[in-house]
């Protein structure tokens, strides 16, 4: 193919960093990404792409057409920030109080713009087309579905879907690209245990929902350890418990929330079934009533083996031999999985941590930041992966 995308992307580093830092200073929450979307749309229009805004409320789609028919490659980049107050002291710290890019989506958007520029340079060699999707609301796992409902997978229908995530769990320079299941499917569960409140000094006159809630939390820890095959993976975490306001009052109800993460649909079925049985059984045994709602967020994120092999080969020239991690997995979830549930594709984790510079805080932390050297590398990797499909030779 004789194209050095890393050389081209490195030459753009100042621009990519400038995009990222501007976006970082002006973060926007899910379905509120109007400024970000406007910048994206304007940049894509400047390149001469066919651009559609307002897809899935605030999403943007750009079509880069080639010189002849060929595969349609979908590239997805998320744009939204988190409701977190930033604690970093940088020149590009968030100016939107209480909102922060604490997961790298500012970097993803900047990488997306860079990829558009890189591929546009070689438009005269493209056999096929590239569909760049800038997606809202990944943090609440609703943006992918919203864009799909607005027809983002139609006209043209993608043949393959690619995406990436900057990843602070591994150092800059390393890249995780895993065949098969790479990220977990996610569910939210909400539990209400209804009892009978009363005086804390007369518990025999009550049906204590707090006691039931405590037993539920404890019993739920047995689901993974006693009901799931040890060779499978699952996480069931209760993350919120609210009940009562006074030291001498047994409340009438307790409310719990949590998350279930699984790699397999069969494991999810078992865990969800036990969740129902435990909540109902304990509540009934202690004289309370219960209500349980389980809301699916995303399916497991599964990389297509053939696509993953081709992408691995395409990006290998830009990575040190031992820096390609073929078995990097996480119980985190991503709504890119909704695209990959419909289209064969591959999601890539691009290392972004730098311990020497203290750029190693985890995602969603108020001091999250990443090594910006990951930006041109990420752009080069994706451009090369696309080229494997649409630039012959």
Image (tube, rainbow, N blue to C red):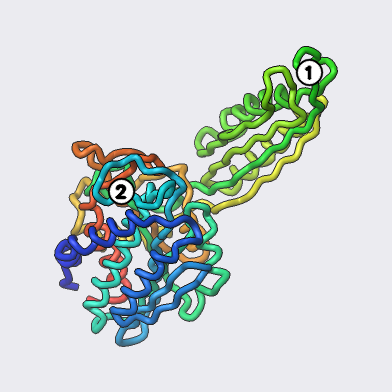
Q: What is the quadrant of residue 151 in the picture?
A: bottom right
Tell me the number on the disc at residue 93.
2
Image quarter in which the C terminus is found: bottom left
Q: Residue furthest top?
A: 201
Check the image and report above or below for 275 versus 81. Answer: above
Residue reaching furthest to the right: 205
Instruction: Please state the horizontal and vertical placement of residue 237, each as a whole percent of the image.
Output: 56, 34
Q: Upstream in the sequence, badge 2 or badge 1?
A: 2
Q: Does residue 306 appear anywhere in the picture?
A: no
In depth, the one of 112 and 275 nearer the eye is: 112
Name the residue tied to disc 1: 199
Residues packed near mark 1 inside 10 Å, few (<14), some (14 to 19) or many (20 plus)? some
| 171 sits to left or right of 178 | left
Task: In this rendered view, identify the residue nearer to me: 135 or 249.
Answer: 249
Q: Is residue 217 above or below residue 83?
A: above
Q: Position of residue 322 (x, y in %)?
A: 21, 46
Locate residue 313, reporting x and y percent. 26, 60
Residue depicted at 27% across the width and 62% down the height? 19
Q: Are marks 2 and 1 in contact (CB under 8 Å)?
A: no
Pick the residue in front: 63 or 344: 63
Q: Nearer the viewer, residue 40 or 374?
A: 40
Position of residue 261 measured from the top left corner of the image (x, y, whole percent): 54, 42
Where residue 135 sits, quadrant-wise, is bottom left
Q: Which residue reaches farthest bottom?
A: 68
Numbered disc 1: secondary structure? strand
Q: Quadrant of residue 3?
A: bottom left
- Checking the image for residue 217, the label placed there is none
Residue visible at 49% across and 47% down in the picture: 184
Considering the image in quadrants, where does the N terminus appear?
Answer: bottom left
Q: Classify mark 2: residues with Cα within 10 Å, few (<14), some (14-19) or many (20+).
A: some
Q: Is residue 64 visible?
A: yes
Structural distance between the alpha carbons of marks 2 and 1? 50 Å
């Amino acid at each position: 193919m004789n194209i050095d995308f890393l050389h081209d992307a490195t030459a753009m580093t100042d621009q990519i960093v400038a995009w990222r830092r501007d976006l970082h200073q002006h973060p926007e929450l899910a379905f509120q990404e109007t400024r970000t979307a406007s910048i994206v749309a304007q940049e894509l229009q400047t390149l001469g792409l066919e651009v559609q805004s307002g897809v899935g409320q605030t999403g943007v789609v750009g079509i880069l057409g080639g010189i002849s028919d060929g595969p349609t490659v979908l590239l997805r980049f998320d744009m939204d920030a988190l409701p977190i107050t930033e604690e970093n002291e940088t020149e590009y710290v968030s100016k939107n109080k209480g909102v922060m890019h604490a997961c790298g989506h500012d970097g993803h958007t900047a990488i997306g713009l860079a990829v558009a520029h890189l591929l546009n340079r070689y438009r005269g060699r493209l056999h096929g087309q590239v569909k760049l999707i800038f997606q809202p609301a990944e943090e609440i796992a609703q943006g992918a579905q919203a864009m799909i409902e607005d027809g983002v997978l139609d006209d043209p229908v993608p043949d393959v879907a690619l995406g990436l995530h900057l990843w602070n769990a591994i150092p800059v320079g390393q890249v995780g690209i895993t065949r098969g299941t790479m990220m977990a499917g996610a569910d939210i569960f909400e539990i209400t245990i209804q009892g009978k409140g009363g005086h804390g000094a007369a518990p025999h006159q009550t049906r204590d929902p707090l006691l039931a809630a405590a037993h539920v939390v404890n019993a739920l820890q047995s689901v993974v350890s006693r009901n799931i095959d040890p060779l499978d993976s699952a996480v069931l975490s209760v993350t919120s418990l609210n009940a009562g306001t006074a030291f001498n009052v047994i409340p009438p109800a307790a409310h719990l929330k949590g998350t279930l993460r699984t790699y397999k649909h069969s494991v999810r079925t078992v865990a969800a079934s036990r969740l129902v049985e435990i909540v109902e059984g304990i509540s009934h045994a202690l004289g309370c009533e219960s209500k349980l709602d389980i809301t699916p967020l995303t399916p497991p994120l599964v990389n297509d083996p053939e696509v993953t092999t081709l992408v691995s080969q395409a990006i290998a020239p830009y990575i040190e031999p031992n820096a390609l991690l073929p078995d990097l997995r996480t119980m985190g979830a991503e709504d890119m999985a909704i695209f990959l549930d419909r289209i064969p594709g591959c999601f890539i984790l691009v290392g972004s941590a730098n311990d020497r510079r203290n750029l190693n805080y985890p995602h969603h932390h108020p001091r999250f930041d990443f090594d910006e050297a990951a930006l041109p590398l990420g752009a080069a990797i994706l451009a090369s992966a696309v080229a494997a499909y649409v630039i012959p030779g």
